[in-house]
Structure formats: structure tokens, C-alpha cells
Amino acid sequence: MAADPEALVIRTNVVFGPEQVGKNFVYQLVRKLKASESMNVPSDQKNTPTYNRDLADATKQLVEAGAVGVFNVGGPEVLGRVEFAEVVADCLGLDKKPIVPLTTENNGQAALRPLDSGLSLEKVQAIIPGWQPRSVRDALAHWIANPRGKLLGA
């Protein structure tokens, strides 16, 4: 913002949904669970899982509205990572037993991550009234009904 006070900056986290590489958390989790392989999941991190199609829609609407400044764009729920993983497993009918809760300190993640990165959406919803991101369950249902990119579980 210091470099360009007229910039639009979007903050988001834990983006999931269809993409070409199949690298986001949900793809990784589904691959592991389908193969009955364990998946270490941080037990002490809270995030706002963000469906990539909702992120794209909000971004487009913010640009069209001429928004300037910093905006949080995320999902409507603040979930622990383990809870997020369990919701994904439930929605897809996968066994949750391979999900291994570990603290961030013991998880060996390469990048440092905050323990609580839930996002408040009030500012973005004030600029684009009526915009409502999908819950994880609704986003997964939409993704399954409207597949694009790499197939989930492939």
C-alpha cells in the first residue's frame, strides 16, 4: 500500500478447489486417505478454508467495484486444520483414521504458519453486499458437481 495507495490487496488462506496440479491441501489429503496412508495434520492451527471459485468471484467483484485497500477474502468458517480434514473425509466418504493430529512444532512444515489465521469478512461484504462464500461442505459439493482441473482423488 505504501508503494501504491490505490492498490487492491487481497488476504486469504487455506485455498482449496479444482486446479491443474492437484497440490492444495484437499487434493493431498484425499490422495493419502484413498491410499490408506497417514497424513499429518496440524492440531493447533485455525484457518479460514477458502474455496478458490469464491475467491475468484470476490476478486472480480472487488475489481469491478473499484475497491482500494486491504481486504480479507475467505470462507465463512474458522476451522482447525484437523476439523477441516475430517469434514473433507466425511463429505467424500473416506476413512478419517489415517488423519494424524500433530502440533505445528512437531509437524515439520517447511514454512512457518500462524496458529490462528481466521479471517474477518465484514469489510469485503460491505463492499460487495450479498457476496457469501460457501461453507467447506457446500464448496466440496459444488466442486464434485462441477469438476475442473485435476480430478479429486486422481
Image (spheres, rainbow, N blue to C red):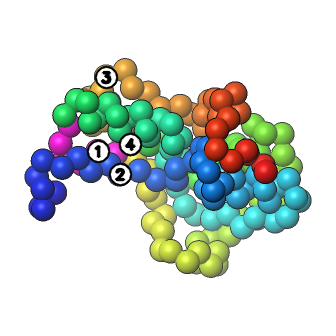
User: Disc number at residue 71?
Assistant: 1
- Label 2, label 1: how far apart the Cα atoms are: 6 Å
The answer to whether residue 118 is seen in the rendering is yes
- Label 4, label 3: how far apart the Cα atoms are: 13 Å
Tell which of 120 and 37 is nearer to you: 37
- Label 3, label 2: how far apart the Cα atoms are: 19 Å
Residue type, label 3: Pro
Crowding at label 4, few (<14), some or many (≥20) Cα neighbours within 10 Å?
Answer: many
Indicate which disc, 2 or 4, sits on the residue closer to the N terminus.
Answer: 2
User: Disc number at residue 73?
Assistant: 4
- Label 4, label 1: how far apart the Cα atoms are: 6 Å
**Placement of the N terminus among the 4 image quadrants:** bottom left
Tell which of 149 and 106 is nearer to you: 149
Callout 1 secondary element:
strand
- Label 2, label 4: how far apart the Cα atoms are: 6 Å
Crowding at label 1, few (<14), some or many (≥20) Cα neighbours within 10 Å?
Answer: many
Vertical comparison of 43 with 49: above or below: below
Mark 2 sits on what residue?
Answer: 11
Q: Which region shows up in magenta? A: 67-73
The residue furthest top is 130
Horizontally, residue 60 falls left or right of residue 87, namely left
Q: In the rendered structure, are the residues bearing label 2 and label 4 in contact, judged by CB atoms less than 8 Å apart? A: yes
Indicate which disc, 2 or 1, sits on the residue closer to the N terminus.
Answer: 2
Tell which of 31 and 121 is nearer to you: 31
Residue 139 in picture, x, y percent from top left: 60, 34
Residue type, label 4: Val
Q: In the rendered structure, are the residues bearing label 2 and label 1 in contact, judged by CB atoms less than 8 Å apart? A: yes
Indicate which disc, 3 or 2, sits on the residue closer to the N terminus.
Answer: 2
The residue furthest right is 36
Q: In the rendered structure, are the residues bearing label 3 and label 1 in contact, judged by CB atoms less than 8 Å apart? A: no
Tell which of 102 and 63 is nearer to you: 63
